Image (tube, grey):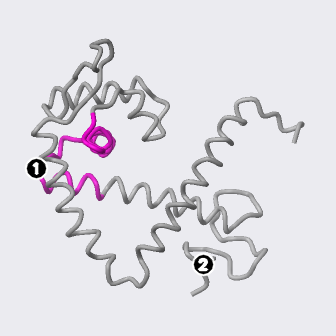
């Protein structure tokens, strides 16, 4: 199957209009990639919700699970701003709300830095248990299913590099769009 035909209604030939497309552009390959990315993000969130429910934490949102895992990364306490940067989030008030929820749930706790001036967050024993149980179920239901795919580790590494480059491109487009005027293009 042609890689350009990954989405229902994808064009059969270059330059052919895609049936049912919602965007009026001449870039069907980029459009299909963007829609596939949106569908992947939605599927990722749904699977995260399901995995959280499977390990008994259905009240934790996918965003909170990502925050919890980022705090646990390298088992080193982190301030909210660093967590936001690592997750590429610019909605610090929402992130702080999630941190308060995780703290009330007993999954993270505040700790002072070495000088006692700044607040960092660290994962509690309950938070560690959640992340370990989540990782075990994720490994069984998702990661193990990838192993039969030939060259999957290399393909995932290349995909990660591409997604990182595209993240930078979309971030830059977001910054530029704040002052973009169509007549200047």
**Which quarter of the figure has residue 19?**
bottom right
Residue 117 place in picture, x, y as percent? 32, 12
Residue placed under numbered mark 1 in the picture: 56
- Circle 2: element type: helix
Q: Which mark is residue 5?
A: 2
- Circle 1: element type: loop
User: What type of secondary structure mainly makes up the magenta span?
Assistant: helix
Residue 98 place in picture, x, y as percent? 30, 30
Q: Which mark is residue 40?
A: none
Q: Residue at x 26, y 28 (%)?
A: 121
Q: Are marks 2 and 1 in contact (CB under 8 Å)?
A: no
* First in residue order: circle 2 vs circle 1: 2
**Which quarter of the figure has residue 34?**
bottom right
Location of residue 146 with respect to 82 vertically, above or below: below
The residue nearer to you, when weighing 7 against 185, is: 185
Q: Which stretch appears magenta? A: 47-76
């Amino acid at each position: 199957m042609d890689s350009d035909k990954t989405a229902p209604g994808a064009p059969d030939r270059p330059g052919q209009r895609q049936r049912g497309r919602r965007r009026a552009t001449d870039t069907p390959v980029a459009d299909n990639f963007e829609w596939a990315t949106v569908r992947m993000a939605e599927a990722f969130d749904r699977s995260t919700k399901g995995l959280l429910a499977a390990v008994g934490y259905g009240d934790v949102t996918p965003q909170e699970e990502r925050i919890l895992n980022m705090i646990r990364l390298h088992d080193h306490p982190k301030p909210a701003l660093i967590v936001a940067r690592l997750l590429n989030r610019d909605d610090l008030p929402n992130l702080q709300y999630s941190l308060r929820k995780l703290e009330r749930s007993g999954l993270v706790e505040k700790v002072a830095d070495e000088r006692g001036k700044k607040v960092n967050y660290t994962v509690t024993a309950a938070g560690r248990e959640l992340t370990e149980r989540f990782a075990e179920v994720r490994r069984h239901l998702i990661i193990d299913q990838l192993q039969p795919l030939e060259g999957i580790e290399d393909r995932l590494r290349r995909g990660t590099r591409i997604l990182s480059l595209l993240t930078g491109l979309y971030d830059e487009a977001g910054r530029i769009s704040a002052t973009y005027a169509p007549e200047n293009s």
